[in-house]
Image (cartoon, rainbow, N blue to C red):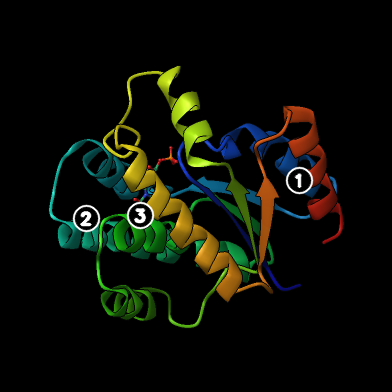
Amino acid sequence: MAGLFITLEGMDGAGKSTHIPTMLNLLAASGREVVATREPGGTPLGEQLRELLLHQEMHVETESLLMFAARAEHLQQLILPALARGAIVVSDRFTDASYAYQCGARGLPLAKMQALESWVQGDLQPDLTLLFDVPVEVSLQRLAGARTPDKFEAQGAEFFARLRAQYLARAAEFPQRFRVIDANRSLEQVKKSVEEIILSL
Ligand code: TMP
């Protein structure tokens, strides 16, 4: 049986991580192997790179290269073998986050990102991407009440506005794999939308 690759995306504060357990339970009920992972991270090396990426200021090119170094390791060690076994892989973020954060918010030229994408992942794209969307103010409000922010969470409204615009542009460009979820609703309502999407698979 072919594997299934599902990715979750959204601005910091959009609340995507809250819904992962529900999603994993529903997917596990299908009887298939489910592998939950995240980016940057997902492997021992990837988790070390995550520490650097989330807390160390660096040039956007360095940041993009390190994101894709972590992604190459993640794909080779975990994602591709799991998909080859026929598993369902659920990744909390993937390459759409690089387009949103490094290109949209930080200004890396799209052509450089496309070159990295094609080098590291070839033709592999997620089968389904859930984009948790909230207005910028909502995201900033939610983050204000949270723990000490990492370097991305500490950015201001303009950064978040560019980020959101790029995420929505990606969703419009790839409508066949994106599902945009209005995450500016009650937890119950968002959970219901997530359940509907997963059950329709
Ligand atoms: P999170 O997993 O808690 O959402 O944190 C990961 C952070 O890293 C988040 O702020 C988004 C950022 N990020 C990028 O900037 N580019 C990427 O390619 C990925 C995967 C994450």
99 sits to left or right of 20: left
Q: Nearer the viewer, residue 43 or 133?
A: 133
From the image, tell me which residue sits under label 2.
63
Q: Report whether residue 128 is seen.
A: yes
Asked whether mark 2 lies closer than 8 Å to ligand 1, one says yes
Residue depicted at 39% across the width and 45% down the height: 160
Query: Residue 82: x, y in percent?
Result: 58, 62
Amino acid found under the numbered disc labelled 2 = Glu
Foreground: disc 3 or disc 1? 3
Residue 194, numbered circle: 1
Mark closest to the chain's N terminus, 2 or 3? 2
Question: Is the CB atom of the residue marked by disc 3 within 8 angstroms of ligand 1's nearest atom?
Answer: yes
Q: Which amino acid does label 1 sit on?
A: Val
Q: Does label 3 or label 1 sit earlier along the sequence?
A: 3
Compared with 87, 84 (above or below) is below
Q: Where is residue 140, by image quadrant? A: top left
- The residue sitting at 33% across, 49% down in the picture is 46
Residue at horizontal 53 percent and vertical 32 percent from the top: 138
The C terminus is located in which quarter? bottom right
Question: Label 2 crowding class (10 Å Cα cut-off): few <14, some 14-19, many 20+?
Answer: some
